[in-house]
Amino acid sequence: MIRGDLSITLPKIRLILHKFSFWRYYGIIHMGKSTVSVHDRGEDQSSLVYPVVSRRSGGLSVGINLFPDGKRCSFDCPYCEVRPFVGSRVFSAEALEAELEAFLAAGYKAAWAPRPVRDLCVSGNGEPTLSPHLWEALEICAAARRRHPDILAPGACPIVIITNSTGFMDEETARRLAEFARSEPLDIWAKLDAGSQERFALMSRSSYSLDDISEALGNFARSTPVTIQTMICGMDGAAGGAVGAAAKAANDAEALSYAARVNAMLEKGAAIKAIQVYTLARAPLEAGISALSDEAVMRFVGLVSGALNRPLPVYGYGERGTGPLRQR
C-alpha cells in the first residue's frame, strides 16, 4: 500500500499524534540536541522518527525505527547501544507517516534548519529485514521524499537501510529489496564485521556462518550495488578478546582476511560502492568494549585498501566527527 498521495495537513498530524501521546510530537520537534554520541529515540526508545547527527551520513540523518515495542535482531553484538527493553507501543504505518510528516512539516524548521537532511535511514532498535512492516515503511519514506523535495532534496537525500546482511539469505527479502532499489533511490549499507569466522562469532555472538552470509551478500550485490559497513572496536574485556600487542596483531591479520573476503566477492561480480570502517561513538551494550583510536582505524583502512585487488573507496570513521578521517 502506497500512502504518499494522501492529503496531510499539520492539524491532521497533531490530531493523529495525539492518539500516541503529545510528547511524541513535541519530542520530534525538540530532538535538536542529538549528537554523534547520542542517538535519542525518545521516551522508552519508542519514537518511530528520530533525527540524529551521523558520522557516516555526514550530518543530519532522519532515523526510521521499525521496533518501538522492543529490540529485535538476529545478532547479539556486544558493541550495540540498544539494550533489550519492552516498549509501550507497537509499530503502525499510520503513526510512522504522521511522525515523519510532523518532522518534515514543523520539526525540521524548529530544531534543525538550515542543516541539510542527508538521508532517511531505516535502522532503529533492530534488524530492519526482520520487520513485516519494512516494505510499507520504505514506501512511506519514498512518498515523503516526493512531497518534500525542498527538505529531502532529489539526488542528495536517499533512503538508506542499515542491515546486518542476514536478510540477503532469504530469497524473498533479497528480491524485494532489489526491486525497491530499482525504483527508488535506496542505499543499502550491509554489515560485514569480520574476515574470519572466529572474529565474526565474537562480534555477532550468533550461530550464523560467515561464509553463508558473505555468499548471500555477494550474490545480492551482483545485481544491486551495496556499501559495506564494518565495525572495529577494542574488546579487551570481552570473552575471547585479545589484549595489547596481541590485539594489534589480531586486527592486522583480520584486516587481511577481511580484504580477501571482499576480493572474493568482487571477483564474482559484486558491485561494492564503498567500504565504511568505523569504531564506537556511543556507549555499548556491555562493559569491556571500547572505541579504537583514529590511528588504529586508519591502520585497518590502510591494510584493507592495500590488499584489495581493485580500486575501491575505503573510509575510516573515528569516535568523533561528522565525516571520514583523513589518511596521514
Image: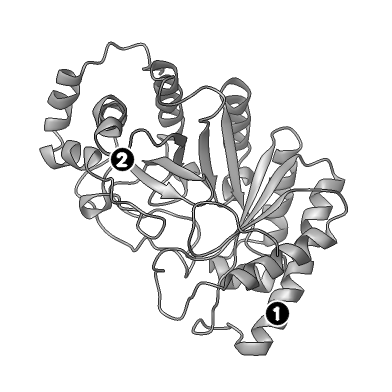
Q: Are marks 2 and 1 in contact (CB under 8 Å)?
A: no
How many labels were placed on the picture? 2
User: In terms of image quadrants, where is residue 172?
Assistant: top right
User: In terms of image quadrants, where is residue 23?
Assistant: top left
Looking at the picture, the colour scheme in use is: one colour
Task: Say the numbered circle drawn on residue 250.
Answer: 1
The kind of residue tagged 2 is Leu
- In the depicted view, which residue is nearer to us: 152 or 73? 152
Element at badge 2? loop
Give the quarter of the figure containing the C terminus: bottom right
The kind of residue tagged 1 is Ala
Give the quarter of the figure containing the N terminus: top left
Of callouts 2 and 1, the N-terminal one: 2
Measured in 3D between alpha carbons, the distance from the residue under mark 2 to the one under mark 1, in whole angstroms, is 39 Å
Which residue is painted at 57% across and 45% down in the image?
A: 167
Which residue is painted at 22% across and 54% down in the image?
A: 44
Element at badge 1? helix
Q: Position of residue 104 (x, y in %)?
A: 32, 27
Which residue is painted at 41% across and 20% down in the image?
A: 150
Q: Residues within 10 Å of mark 1 (few under 14, many from 20)?
A: some
Q: Position of residue 288 (x, y in %)?
A: 45, 81
Indicate left or right for 243 with 90 as reference: right
Task: Say the numbered circle drawn on residue 48.
Answer: 2
Position of 52 relative to 105 (above/below): below
Task: Say the numbered circle drawn on residue 88.
Answer: none
